[in-house]
Image: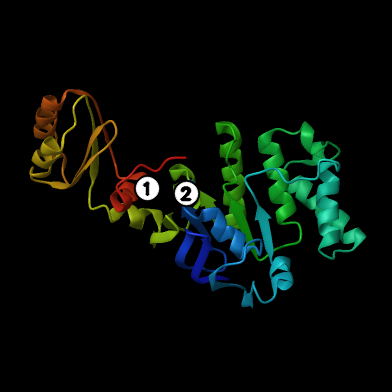
Amino acid sequence: MLVIEHLTRRYGDLLALDDISLEVKSGELVGLLGPNGAGKSTTVGVCTTRILPTAGRVEIEGIDVMRDPVAARRRIGVVTQYNTLDRACTVHENLYYHCRYFGLGAAESRRRCADLLEQFRLSDRADQFPGQLSGGLAQRVQIARAIAHRPRVLFLDEPSAGLDPQSRLALWDLILKLREEGLTVLLTTHQMEEADRLSHRLAIIDHGRVLVIGTPDELKRQVGAATILELQLDHPTSDLANRLRALGGVADVVLTERGIRVMATTRALLPRAVELAQEGGLHDLTITEPTLETVFITLTGRELRD
């Protein structure tokens, strides 16, 4: 459904995209996970014809988006992290005029609007203006508008950015329903939980390159650890990290801003690890299973920040 081949984008000396290749199958939700500035939004910008690439190509349902951008736009829906609703139009009018813009007749547009308002639980907001809506409601309207013309591929560019936790969870439920209905989706995010919960497959991206692709569970297994021990220390040192690494059952050890992270294949080493950590001024510890952030840190050696 969506094919990205050797995509490169330069802004002067800045290499925003560095030979990215990715395929999204029909009915699949693929997430792009990475920090701000990793190249996620630039990738979506090229795919949605808003940015011209320096090199490479993108096809949507066999259509080259650079050679035939008009045909490509008919097949895509786009939701950005910013509110792009027409503030001079009501919720109903935003949906209605979008349908008309994409060639639906007046009667069909009214029926489609009614269906979308009901599907997205917006019927009681139909006559309100975007400025009267909360962030979560406005984002629901944006998604409803993006799929109003029945696109083949939906691009969600950090759709939950700036939303409160309750609105974010409601939005995730909505996206999961669209996934269950078989809509093809490319989602960008810097939130691990969002990527883990929503994605069929996930591509971790940093500095304009795709580092790894797989299901969330597959990526976590690549860490090679069953347990992650976070040691918060007053004095983390390389010498202490090396001594922890020498313990049996340690897959890797990473110095962090707050201390040392030990990736262990067995919990049997925990007493000895804690004993050693006392030398570094241990004041707190947590024990968890591998996460997507663990995968990111293993690949890049740095924290995944907003």
Crowd rating for badge 2 (residues with CA inside 10 Å; few <14, some 14–19, many 20+) = many
Residue under label 1, please give it: 292
Residue 237 appears left or right of 186: left
Residue 195's disc number: 2
Q: Is residue 196 visible?
A: yes
Whether residue 106 is situated above or below residue 290 in the rendered picture: below
Residue at x 64%, y 62% (from the top left corner): 48
Q: Can residue 183 be seen in this view?
A: no
SS for callout 1: helix
CA separation, marks 1 and 2? 8 Å
Crowd rating for badge 1 (residues with CA inside 10 Å; few <14, some 14–19, many 20+) = many
Residue at x 60%, y 64% (from the top left corner): 47
Q: Earlier in the sequence, mark 1 or mark 2?
A: 2
The quadrant of the image that shows the N terminus is: bottom right
Whether residue 126 is situated above or below residue 63 in the rendered picture: above
Give the quadrant of residue 68.
Answer: bottom right
Query: Residue 197: x, y in percent?
Result: 47, 47
Query: Residue 6: x, y in percent?
Result: 47, 72
Query: Residue 38: x, y in percent?
Result: 46, 52
Residue at x 81%, y 51% (from the top left corner): 95
Q: Identify which amino acid the numbered label 2 is placed on.
A: Ala
Asked if the residues shown at circle 1 and circle 2 are in contact, with their CB atoms under 8 angstroms apart, the answer is: yes
Residue nearest the observer in this picture, 256 or 187: 256
Q: How many labels does the image show?
A: 2
Query: Residue 263: x, y in percent?
Result: 21, 44
Residue at x 54%, y 60% (from the top left corner): 43
Residue nearest the observer in this picture, 284 or 43: 43
Residue 105 appears left or right of 180: right
Residue 72's disc number: none
Residue 196 appears left or right of 109: left
